[in-house]
Image (spheres, helix red, strand yellow):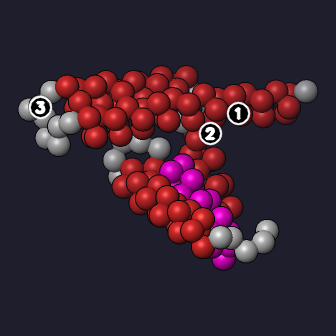
Amino acid sequence: MGQRNPLTRVVLAVVGGVVLLGGVVLLVLPGPGLLLVLAGLVTLAAAFPALQRHVEPVREQAMKAAETSVATPLRIAGSVAAGLGLIGAGVVWGLVPQVPLAGWATGVSLIVSGIVLLVLLYYSHRRVKAGSAHTKG
């Protein structure tokens, strides 16, 4: 990979930093925190190749967490409920002015977190299912 345009590096650094910080926040709040940390780190590594060495360990942990979420039908149901709950909470936060931090900025972030959670759950389920099909055959 050649030298990046300085403007491209700045954009990657800002986007990667925001996504990484969002992921760190979501490590303690409901949402796909570790996966957002990974996405932010991958983006930052595109701007700063020295960070590339940190990507694989985070990727492994994120994939383990994703696979754990689909290990049993009860976990799948819980994860689906969490995703739908985030989407529902987002609608409430967008429509009900009496809730703390009310507004569509909070609501949309919750809705997006719920959608990302459901998409990642689907991806994880397919990945685990494909892996188990290879080990059986």
Main SS of the magenta segment?
Answer: helix
Question: Would you name the residue on which mark 1 appears?
Answer: 128
**Quarter that holds the N terminus:** bottom right
Give the image location of residue 47, x and y in percent. Answer: 62, 69
Residue 9 colored magenta? no
Residue at the spot 86% in from the left edge and 31% down from the top edge: 134
If you read the primary sequence from the N terminus, does the residue marked by circle 3 or circle 2 appear first? Answer: 2
Q: Say whether residue 98 is left or right of residue 54.
A: left
Q: Position of residue 103 (x, y in %)?
A: 21, 36
Marker count (numbered): 3
Is label 3 in contact with label 1 (beta carbons under 8 Å)? no
Q: Eyeballing the image, is 62 above or below 18?
A: above
Q: Which residues are magenta?
A: 34-53
**Which residue sits furthest right?**
137
Query: Who is closer to the viewer here, 64 or 116?
Result: 116
| Relative side of 130 to 90, left or right | right
